[in-house]
Image: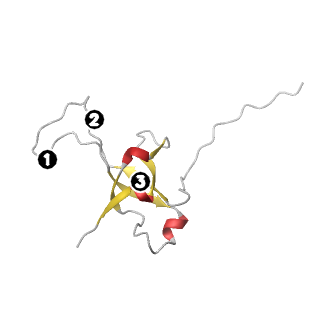
Amino acid sequence: MKKEKPTEPQTFEIVEPIGKRVLIRKDEDKKQTKGGIQLPDNIEIPTITGRIVTISAEVLNSPDIPLRQYDKVLFNPKNAIPVDFEGDNRLFVVEVENVVAVFRKS
């Protein structure tokens, strides 16, 4: 009977979205309101802004999609797919249709 070697867990270095998707790093959750009120640690206000880390080749090559790497965006987190890639788990794969705004400097 041949003994099989235990497989080592794979470590990934990059996540590349496929199709009309982007990889977004969600901004930190807010701990204080704009008025200066400190929020308790056990309350979580959903943050739906973030920065695009990576875009798919389809998005990159499409002149109709105005998204680029490092853009700050507002996105709908309802259908965002969390990526358990980092300890803080703030990475999400998001379909382009769920990116609702891009912040631009005038």
Q: Residue furthest left?
A: 35
How many angstroms separate mark 2 from mark 3 (CA)? 19 Å
Q: Residues within 10 Å of mark 1 (few under 14, many from 20)?
A: few
- Taking the image as shown, residue 87 lies to the left or right of residue 28, namely right
The residue positioned 18% from the left and 34% from the top of the image is 39
Residue 34 badge: 1
Q: Quadrant of the N terminus?
A: top right
Q: Tell me which colouring the rendered structure shows.
A: secondary structure
Residue 24 badge: 3
The residue positioned 63% from the left and 37% from the top of the image is 9
Q: Earlier in the sequence, mark 2 or mark 3?
A: 3
The residue positioned 87% from the left and 28% from the top of the image is 2
Name the element at disc 2. loop
Name the element at disc 3. strand
When the figure is inspected, residue 65 is found, relative to residue 98, above or below; the finding is below
Name the element at disc 1. loop
Residue 13 vs residue 37, the one in the foreground: 37
Q: Which residue is mark 2?
A: 44
Residue 79 vs residue 49, the one in the foreground: 79
- Would you say the residues marked 2 and 3 are in contact, meaning their CB atoms lie under 8 Å apart? no
